[in-house]
Image (cartoon, helix red, strand yellow):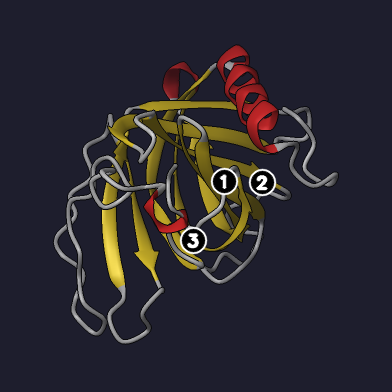
Amino acid sequence: MMRPGDKWAGAALALGGLAVAVGAGCAKPPWPFEPFVSKLEIADFRDAQNIRRYQEEFPEAFYNLDGHGNLTLVLRRKGGESGDGGNIAQVVRVRSVWRPVPNRSVSHRTQINAVMSYYVVGGRVGDTFEGAGAVFFQVGDGDVLEGSIDHAVLRAKRQLSAGEPLFPRAELSGKFRAVRDRRQVVRIVNELERRFGPMPAQTKKP
């Protein structure tokens, strides 16, 4: 039987592609952004004196826009192993609630215009981290979406098994590039909702 604190044992520090951990008060490392890769930084605030910042790449990125121009975005990465031997998947889900209009809306990283969820799941274990933040995006040639999560604050909400979550509170930021594919968005969202249940009522399905 897996002990409560062991559910993410062997998960490469619990996230499949963790690259960098930076102590509190230190400058962020150089972070080049290749046009075809979505990259996010996850800041772990478990220890306020030693904030750990992790960089992660998400090779799968899909989005859809509703009739009002609101965005549903899913980013997914697979890799790593949970304590029960399951393969780990990380998914970031973003749902905008209003869209800044260039030259008309006041845009700032502390604004809240989207609800966001970060899922880490593997085998019989899984955690969700949910919150809100600022997301900016635009659609370019070929329906390719480019944008950024400037700042989002997430807290541990739901778990599939006993044990401590990866972190009680985290901040999320980074850049993304996604292709328009409503079917993929719906499929991934449905998979998450089968495991964890639906998001709050105000965040409608894409």
Looking at the picture, does residue 146 appear above or below residue 164?
above
Specify the label residue 164 is tagged with: 3
Of marks 2 and 3, the one in the foreground: 3
Give the residue type at disc 2: Ser
Q: Residues within 10 Å of mark 2 (few under 14, many from 20)?
A: many
Give the residue type at disc 1: Ser
Q: Residue at x 56, y 34 (%)?
A: 73
Describe the element under mark 1 as helix, strand or loop: loop
Taking 13 as reference, is 76 left or right? right
Work out how far the residue at label 2 is from the one at label 1, CA to CA, in angstroms: 30 Å
Specify the label residue 161 is tagged with: 1
Looking at the picture, does residue 141 appear above or below residue 10?
above
Q: Position of residue 147 (x, y in %)?
A: 45, 43
Give the residue type at disc 3: Glu
Taking 66 as reference, is 106 left or right? left
Q: Residue at x 31, y 87 (%)?
A: 49
Report which quarter residue 122 is drawn in.
Answer: top left
Q: Residue at x 34, y 30 (%)?
A: 85
Sequence-wise first label, 2 or 3: 2
Work out how far the residue at label 1 is from the one at label 3, CA to CA, in angstroms: 9 Å
Specify the label residue 96 is tagged with: 2
